[in-house]
């Protein structure tokens, strides 16, 4: 497996004619959890969409050592899973059927799911504590419950690289802790997780942090590095401070 899961070279992107990402060059290591943070409007979600191939860009994105544009669509969908904000409505589908959508990249046209596909979906729904609702329509769930089902769909892909934009939205603190434990399980399996997070204390639990400001990468480094903490405090105008409390890094307001 390549050392780098994602490589960006001169990546730029615009939305509505306005530049959002500006000449970004970086490498994201395989098998680690990288959190993406920064002020509102820094370009975090746009960066994740660019990594997923969901918007036109200039420059190049490589996935597992191969240019994203060179991946056949279905093969790329097996290698790269996406959990975004504001996912299209699928309210009429059952929870089980939504999670089964994650297996589509593994199925031929009109091929029914195999016993293995059903086993993977059950495991994904169990991991996100959503198995008990498998027969309920998605539209009957709360925001937090819905988020757990969409996470199960992403997990069901069994992709090497998983991109998550605000995966903790609507999740209670205990479920946020469960999500972090799940991410650690994924990286222990050699998978790569890249997540945009507003919860800075949670983001600090990642292996590496990507700090963005005005469409550029201000800093990229280990979450434990003092230079990362200084950059993080700076990008938020020194209105937060990073401290270690009971062996855990946290962000405290000033």
Image: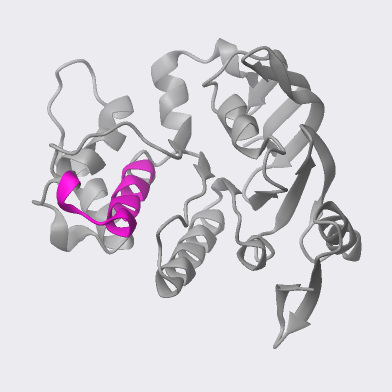
In what quadrant of the picture does the N terminus appear?
top right
Question: Does 217 appear above or below 134?
Answer: above
Residue at the far left in the pictured view: 135
Is residue 213 positioned above or below 200 on the image? above
Is 152 included in the stretch rendered in magenta? Answer: yes
Tell me if residue 95 can be seen.
no
- Residue 112 vs 160, above or below: the answer is above
Left/right placement of residue 17 relative to residue 179 reads right
* x and y percentages locating residue 97 in the rendered image: 16, 39
Instruction: Give how far across and how far down residue 51 sits, in percent.
Output: 60, 28
Q: Toward which corner of the image does residue 205 lie, by quadrant? A: bottom right
Residue 221 seen from this side:
yes
Coloration mode: one colour
Q: At which x and y percent is residue 161?
A: 53, 39
| Left or right placement of residue 53 versus residue 220 in this view | left
- What residue do we see at 73% from left, 52% from top? 209
User: How many numbered marks are there?
Assistant: 0
Q: Would residue 206 appear left or right of 241 to someone viewing this image?
A: left
Percent x, y of residue 204: 69, 64
Residue displayed at 56% across by 50% down: 190
Residue at image location 32% in from the left, 49% down from the top: 152
Quadrant assignment, res 248: bottom right
| Part of the protein shown in magenta | 139-154
Q: Does the segment drawn in magenta span residue 223? A: no
Which residue appears farthest toward the bottom when viewing the image? 246
Pick the residue in front: 45 or 16. Answer: 16
What secondary structure predominates along the stretch shown in magenta? helix
Residue 160 against residue 167 in the figure, above or below: above
Residue pictured at 12% horizontal, 46% vertical: 137
Identify the image quadrant of the C terminus: bottom right
């Amino acid at each position: 497996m390549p050392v780098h899961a994602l490589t960006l070279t001169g990546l730029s992107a615009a939305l509505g004619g306005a530049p959002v990402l500006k000449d970004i060059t970086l490498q994201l290591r395989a098998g680690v959890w990288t959190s993406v943070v920064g002020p509102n409007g820094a370009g975090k979600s746009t960066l994740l969409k660019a990594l997923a191939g969901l918007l036109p860009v200039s420059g190049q994105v490589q996935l597992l050592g191969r240019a994203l544009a060179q991946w056949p669509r279905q093969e790329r969908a097996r290698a790269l899973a996406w959990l975004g904000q504001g996912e299209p409505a699928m309210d009429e589908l059952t929870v089980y059927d939504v999670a089964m959508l994650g297996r589509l990249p593994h199925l031929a046209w009109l091929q029914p799911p195999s016993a293995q596909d059903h086993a993977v979906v059950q495991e994904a729904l169990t991991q996100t504590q959503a198995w008990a609702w498998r027969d309920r329509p998605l539209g009957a769930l709360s925001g937090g419950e819905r988020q757990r089902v969409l996470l199960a769909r992403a997990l069901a892909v069994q992709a090497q690289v998983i991109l998550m934009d605000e995966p903790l939205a609507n999740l209670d603190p205990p479920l946020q802790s469960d999500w972090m434990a799940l991410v650690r399980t994924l990286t222990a399996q050699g998978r790569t997780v890249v997540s945009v997070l507003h919860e800075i204390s949670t983001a600090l639990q990642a292996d590496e942090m990507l700090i963005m400001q005005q469409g550029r990468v201000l800093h990229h480094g280990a979450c434990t590095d003092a230079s990362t903490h200084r950059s993080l405090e700076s990008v938020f105008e020194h209105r937060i401070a990073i401290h270690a409390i009971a062996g855990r890094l946290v962000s405290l307001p000033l």
